[in-house]
Amino acid sequence: MGALEDRLPDNILFTTVDKFLNWSQKSSLWYMLFATACCGIELMQTGASRYDLDRFGAVFRATPRQSDLMIVAGTITHMMADRVKRLYDQMPSPKYVIAMGSCANTGGPFYKDSYAVLKGVDRIIPVDVYVPGCPPRPEALIEGIMKLQEKIMEKKNLVRK
Amino acid sequence: MEAKKIYEILSGRFGSAIQQFQENTLPPSIVVGHQAIVEVCDFLKKAEELEFLSLICLSAVDMQEKGKMAVVYHLGSMRQRHTIVLKVELDRGSPHVRTVGTVWPVAAWYEREAYDLLGVVFDGHPDLRRILMPEDWEGYPLRKDYVYPKRYHTWDV
Ligand code: SF4
């Protein structure tokens, strides 16, 4: 501890603006209430009492306007892809995307010869974290969220451009 | 009732519209002329002893080598505990057949699927739109000569 901190009371802390901004952002990752296939069941379980995603400050919002994070949980068909893109565009920045499960990563079990399925959601929107699995267990999704939080902490907000 | 018996009843009533009895397919099936399909279905549903009240499945098959498109109807009767399969063969160039939605309303959904994936047109269908693919998709993905597009809207497919 520096000499300055020793002279101040305990409830005063030092940090950098970047760290403070990133910390507040990573601690309130509101994700959009949205799932398209079987992975959605694991997402619900992750949000429910046993795994309790709220512990990480991640609660669901029923509108893209209030969401910071889109968890793409499930198969995206070409029909749905336009809608996913539009939902992503409706989210305010800064915004993040987790591709949950093989389908969202690569098309998964539908990769070969499917006429209707989009082969990976990164073809339409930028993805920050990929969580593998078919479906991933809630622990895996939580790990994905923690990885995203690490990524957010690395961000530099106040740099001269 | 045996499939053979059903075939005989239908032949007796519809004559040459009932084209063929295929005993060795599983389950045995009856090939029906496409002009008569609605009347045949209506008869099968309403006749006593037949009572095919449910259309279990309706699908289409691309028979490219024969230049045909077939539509296959799986019918079932809970009361009589029997099933039968009807087939109609259509010209692959312009596959048109009358809708059986007037006999079994559920056919509307199956017919949309057959239209979406194989391009069979069901005349008289109240709402013949694509059901699985986007509405502006081009071509019919389950046709044997279908070439998958490289791009759709703004992305690689
Ligand atoms: S990755 Fe597996 S579990 Fe998840 S949506 Fe696809 S098929 Fe379903």
Image: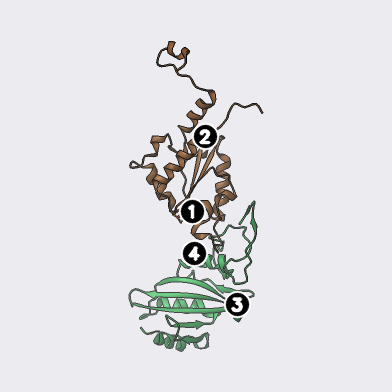
Chain colours: A brown, B green
Residue hosting label 3 = B64
Residue hosting label 1 = A102
**Percent x, y of residue A148:** 49, 39
Work out how far the residue at label 1 is from the one at label 4, CA to CA, in angstroms. Answer: 30 Å
Graded by Cα atoms within 10 Å as few (under 14), some (14 to 19) or many (20 or more), the crowding at tag 1 reads many
Which is more N-terminal, label 3 or label 4? 3
Graded by Cα atoms within 10 Å as few (under 14), some (14 to 19) or many (20 or more), the crowding at tag 4 reads some
Q: What amino acid is found at the position of numbered circle 1 in the picture? A: Ser
Disc 2 vs disc 3: Cβ atoms closer than 8 Å?
Answer: no
Residue hosting label 2 = A152
Name the quarter showing ligand 1: bottom left
Work out how far the residue at label 1 is from the one at label 3, CA to CA, in angstroms. Answer: 35 Å
Horizontal relation, residue A58 to residue A155: left or right: left
Work out how far the residue at label 2 is from the one at label 4, CA to CA, in angstroms. Answer: 47 Å
Q: Are marks 2 and 4 on the same chain?
A: no
Disc 2 vs disc 4: Cβ atoms closer than 8 Å?
Answer: no
Looking at the image, which is closer to me, A8 or B65? A8
Residue hosting label 4 = B109
Q: Which chain letter goes with mark 4? A: B
